[in-house]
Image: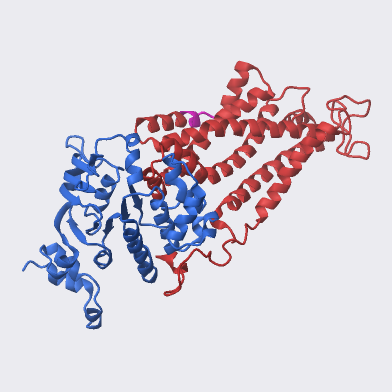
Chain colours: A blue, B red
Amino acid sequence: MTDTPAIELREVCRDFRRPRTSLREAPPVVRALRDVSLTVGRGERFGVVGESGSGKSTLLRLVCGLDRPTSGEVLVEGRSIGDQPARRLGWLRTRLQLVFQDPMSSLDPRMRVRDIIAEPLVAQGIHGDHQARVRELLDRVGLDPGAAGRYPHQFSGGQRQRISVARALAPDPDILVMDEPVSALDVSVRAQVLNLVDEIVDGLDLTLVFVSHDLSVVRHVCDRVAVMQDGQVVETGETERLFTEPGHDYTRSLVAAIPDLHAALAGRSAQDLARGAGRPS
Amino acid sequence: MSEVQGAPAGGVADTGRAPAGGSAGRRLNASLVLGGAIVAAVVVLALLSYVWTPYAPMRVLPVEPYQTPNAEHWLGTDRLRRDVLTQILVGARTTLFVGVVAVGVAAVVGVPLGILAAMSPGWLGQLVMRGNDVLLAFPALLLAIMFAALYGGSTRVAMIAIGIATIPAFARITRSGALGVMRTEYVVAARAAGRSPLGIAVRHVLPNVAGLVIVQASVSFAIAILAEAALAYLGLGTPTGQASWGRMLYEAQTTLRSAPHLALIPGAAIALSVLGFNLFGDGLRDWLDPRLEGR
């Protein structure tokens, strides 16, 4: 069983139908994912990068069983999830958990933190002392136990993201999927949250799928990266190799777009660099 | 990014301490206090009528009719020599009863329909909302009159008719609120956590549209009071021999010139309680919202 990859995508396509624009013509179709094949090994820290509209979010929804592929197969721990109705995916909910981008909208403003964190346990009908588990999780993500009785709006963005992480860890998953978990945060808080992710993924021996548009963040967290553009994976490789010798033009432009102190001091903007690097050589 | 500016500055450890003032408690607002006072007064009057009224309810007294307020009869007497204060007290019962039942019927049917419509994007949601539109297009008073014609005029028929006519208001407001909630990431998070649609409806959608529903309830309560008064005025609601503010208005119309206080007193009672429920609902919405806590 140890050879089964944590997540595997086989030639996955996902099309979205747009509203009809004409009575005669077929409704236009947006091809959000085209023949995507990926393998994420167990214990791997896998990054997915690409600009908005590249299909990252669609990919993520498929992996989490929140959406179904038009064709192809999505396997988590060797089990197919693409063709299962939602109620049959209970096992997936305990193995794979999700952290969202927006710390404001991903926590229900009307629930206390303890109920938010215990939600996956309650929803899955997992028995046991939920309060103790919540205290343990709060401690794990570096929040004080008093936080349990408060509402999300009483916390800062970084703190809310910690609550989100605690919720994801509640059912003791093997795989943690993060959708741009730090892009809504201040730079100073960002590093703290990334360190926390680091620590948790190491400490709990998790498989991490980390989706971001920000390469410097991905570089900090991931071992291996897939670069997406227009619904396709254009390049996959070890993070360091991708940074030092990007193979695809698009990867090169992304790498060049990372803000660089020297470049900034020299008065060149990231856009200039991206334009320069993006030009076919 | 505006949210993050409240975060501790760089270097400060970012652990679970609430921002200053975050748990300072909810401040009462003027609408809530004033509206609450009026609503409480109406409730107290209604309750008082069960234990004490100046004279026996609806009793014809051996006194002069059309008395203006005096020491014997604080609010005067009407055409049939009945004590007006007694009728006002007993009428408060009818008013509250009608409001509670009408709003109850509307909310119990309308809120689940609204949530259902928001959560089922396909034909089912469309069906619910189009059915709703049909009901909405039907004038409420006409519906009540139709009911009265079919089942006879009584307080019970009036309040159920008003309740049914109010369903679309609840269904609409609930649906629009629920649509907003369904778009949030916490609903996606709940799905990812394995919550069933029913669980999401109860745990996430309902609490988050509760504020809207409460405001709608208070507005509808006020409208129901008016509608009951209107029906009683038309002679279709509360029948003769039972106290109702609308009934009192109806009976006062012939003597509007000679004894205006007989119309003014129940009129003022209706207007004041309608205002009270509107203010109360408004204040309650603000007060219930945890995001406004400590402001």
Q: Nearer the viewer, residue B204 or B255?
A: B204
Q: In the image, is residue A142 above or below residue B56?
A: below
Farthest-out residue, bottom:
A266
Judge from the rendering whether residue B111 lies leftward or rightward of residue B185; answer left or right. Answer: right
**Position of B132 relative to A189 (above/below):** above
Horizontal side of B88 relative to A160 (left or right) equals right
- Quadrant for the C terminus of chain A in the image: bottom left
Residue B95, compared with residue A13, is above or below; it is above
Q: Is residue B136 magenta?
A: yes
* Residue at left offset 50%, top offset 63%: B16
Residue at the spot 81% in from the left edge and 33% down from the top edge:
B49
Image x and y of residue A74, in percent: 22, 43
Q: Residue furthest front?
A: A1
Q: Where's residue A222, x and y in %?
A: 25, 62
Closer-to-camera residue (B140/A184): A184
**Residue at 78% in and 36% down:** B47
Q: Quick check: can you spot residue B249?
A: no
Quadrant of the frame with the N terminus of chain A: top left
Q: Is residue B234 left or right of residue B170?
A: right
Tell me residue B193's x, y (percent): 39, 45
Q: In the rendered image, which quarter is residue A80 located in?
A: top left
Say if residue A243 shows up in the picture.
yes
> Residue A252 occupies which quadrant of the picture?
bottom left
**What secondary structure is the magenta-colored segment mainly?**
helix
Camera-nearest residue between A196 and B174: A196
Q: Position of residue B94 (x, y in %)?
A: 72, 30
**Which stretch appears magenta?**
B134-139
